[in-house]
Amino acid sequence: MMYAKSARTAEALQALDTAQSIDPSFEATYLYRGQIFQSLRNVAAAEQQFRRVLEINPRNQQALDLLQRLRTGSK
């Protein structure tokens, strides 16, 4: 998250890959990755990550909200 906030996208994605390898069921990994992809305007990749969060936890409200925003094109 800190890398992403510092616009260090490559480092952020690498750190998230590491986090995923440590604990593939940690929802925040996919949520953060989706938000990075969303900021890069890669809607398909962002949607995939938010859907992964919902596979882990179908009631994750943040992922539901972000996915809805992707569908409507709002920020």
Image (cartoon, rainbow, N blue to C red):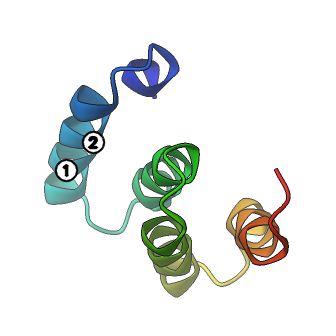
Q: Position of residue 52 (x, y in %)?
A: 46, 78
Q: Residue 14: x and y, percent?
A: 18, 39
Residue, far top: 6
Give the structural element (helix, strand or loop) at label 2.
helix
Q: Are marks 2 and 1 in contact (CB under 8 Å)?
A: yes
In this rendering, is residue 2 above or below 27? Answer: above
Disc nearest the viewer among 2 and 1 = 2
Above or below residue 39? Residue 56 is below
Q: Which mark is residue 13?
A: 2
Q: Residue at the location (16% across, 52% down)?
A: 22
The percent coordinates of residue 16 (x first, y second) are 28, 45
Q: Which residue is mark 1?
A: 17
Query: In the picture provided, is 30 more to the left or to the right than 62?
Result: left
The dot on residue 32 is none
Q: Nearer the viewer, residue 27 or 47?
A: 47
Callout 1: helix, strand or loop?
A: helix
Number of other residues with Cα within 10 Å of mark 1, as a class: few under 14, some 14 to 19, many 20 or more: some
Quadrant of the image occupied by residue 43: bottom right
Residue at image position (82%, 50%) is 75
Which image quadrant for residue 8? top left
Q: CA gap, disc 2 to disc 1?
A: 6 Å
Q: Amino acid at mark 2?
A: Leu
Kind of residue indicated by mark 1: Asp
In the rendered image, residue 17, in percent from the top left (x then y), is placed at 19, 50
